[in-house]
Amino acid sequence: MSTADITQDNGENFAEVARPTGSQRDTAELGRELQEWLTGRLPDGADPAVSDVRLPAANGMSSETILFDATWTESATDPLADAEPGTRRTHELVARVEPGASSMPIFPSYEMGTQFAVMKTVRELSDVPVPAAYWNEPDAGPLGAPFFVMQRIDGDVPPDVMPYNFGSWVTEATEEQRRALQDSSVEILAGLHAIPDPLEHFPFLRLHEAGSTAEESFRAHLARQRGYYEWATADGPRSPLIERCLDRLEATVPADDSPAVLCWGDSRIGNVMYRDFTPVAVLDWEMAAIGPREMDLAWMIFLHRFFEDLTTMAGLPGLPDFMRRDDMAARYRELTEHQPENLDYYSLYAALRHAIVMFRVQSRAIAFGQSERPADPDDMILHRKALEAMLDDTYWAQVR
């Protein structure tokens, strides 16, 4: 049986769970719109020409990604100038566009300007390889929605569809190469969490006037997660399992008076471009937040476990020795001298957050006629069994 034919018990294809199909725009029209927009952004006489507009096959389930080349005549006042004035040079660029309401977006808001600001600030204050963010456009007029434009970087990304554990350049690598990828991925988190005074540098990420400690910031983050669940289920079914998880988490928040840090939010290897198993671009900042270190670390670990559990369900060998929780925590401690605490709790939180996203994704697929609505709403959570095992405190004993 090929991986393309692997399905859940209810018949849904794994390939649809992470990237539901949506409408795609006409690339020629996009090219004209981007060229007109650049003409207004660049100095007089730049005469930009946009070409090779592409919409990646693995376009995200959140913001829309547009790849394009733009050639223009550089000048002394050109913000991207890297040659003698008068030289025409081609720039490889990416536009990230806020999804429209008609696409039934995964999140209630995307705040493209906030993502842009996070990327610029992280690039300025750390060695984390974040692409250069060039322009932010809050006006929906040029492309139909707010967007920003950033540097395009070439590299390899662990695929989501099919998951990299099913068979990819990651599974074909040697153990030493995978360990290099694993360790360098944890280094991303260490670098982000080392940025000093995050509330001073990222004040726009403060939630509900939360304090500066890990616990205070996390309580605000958890409250926002409850609000996200209410939004995601406002016009559809509710999940008793998700509500049990929220209740448990709210009742058992760990005490932690350590300083809160900048969290990437969507800290998974599928949001990183690698070259020779080393990160060259850290992407997707819509979930950036101020919070405890363990929130990022647990998300990175759990998202691998999510794919690994799918691999087991499919009867494939997977990567059981890759990104193991104890190894990841030990590497983080080596880099930061911080001992990760309460990883069972933050792993449940990661699984809960992912469950709400998956619930929204499946609601979206049902609305678009790609899936049937199940009799039990909890079946809309692909990792239901893992989430139930975490609630029963039996999950991690099975996978360590």
Image: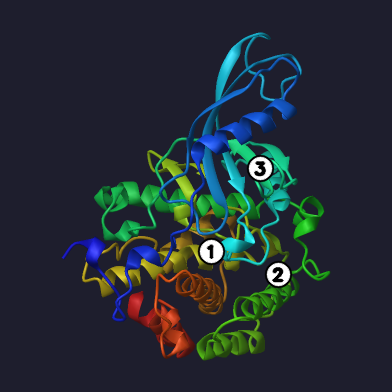
Looking at the rendered image, the disc whose residue lies closer to the viewer, 3 or 1, is 3
Residue beneath disc 2: 214
Looking at this view, is 91 or 146 the one in front? 146
Is residue 130 among what the camera can see?
no
Q: Judge from the rendering whether residue 310 lies leftward or rightward of residue 266; answer left or right.
A: left
Figure quadrant of residue 349: bottom right
Residue beneath disc 1: 297
Q: Judge from the rendering whether residue 160 lies leftward or rightward of residue 261; answer left or right.
A: left
Neighbor class of circle 1 (other Cα within 10 Å; few <14, some 14-19, many 20+) is: many
- The mark nearer the N terminus, 1 or 2, is 2
Whole-number angstrom distance, CA of label 2 to CA of label 3: 31 Å
- State how many labels appear: 3
Residue 168 drawn above or below residue 68: below
Neighbor class of circle 3 (other Cα within 10 Å; few <14, some 14-19, many 20+) is: some
Figure quadrant of residue 44: top right
Residue 58, x across and y down, in percent: 42, 51
Residue 55 drawn above or below residue 371: above
Label 2 residue SS? helix
Quadrant of the image for the N terminus?
Answer: bottom left
Label 3 residue SS? strand
Q: How is the image coloured?
A: rainbow
Looking at this view, is 343 or 145 the one in front? 145
Residue drawn at point x = 47 percent, y = 51 percent: 59
Residue drawn at point x = 57 percent, y = 73 percent: 341
Three-letter amino acid code of the residue under disc 1? Leu
- Tag 2 near tag 3, CB within 8 Å: no
What's the mark number on residue 148? 3
- The mark nearer the N terminus, 3 or 1, is 3
What's the mark number on residue 95? none
Residue 98 drawn above or below residue 234: above
- Tag 3 near tag 1, CB within 8 Å: no
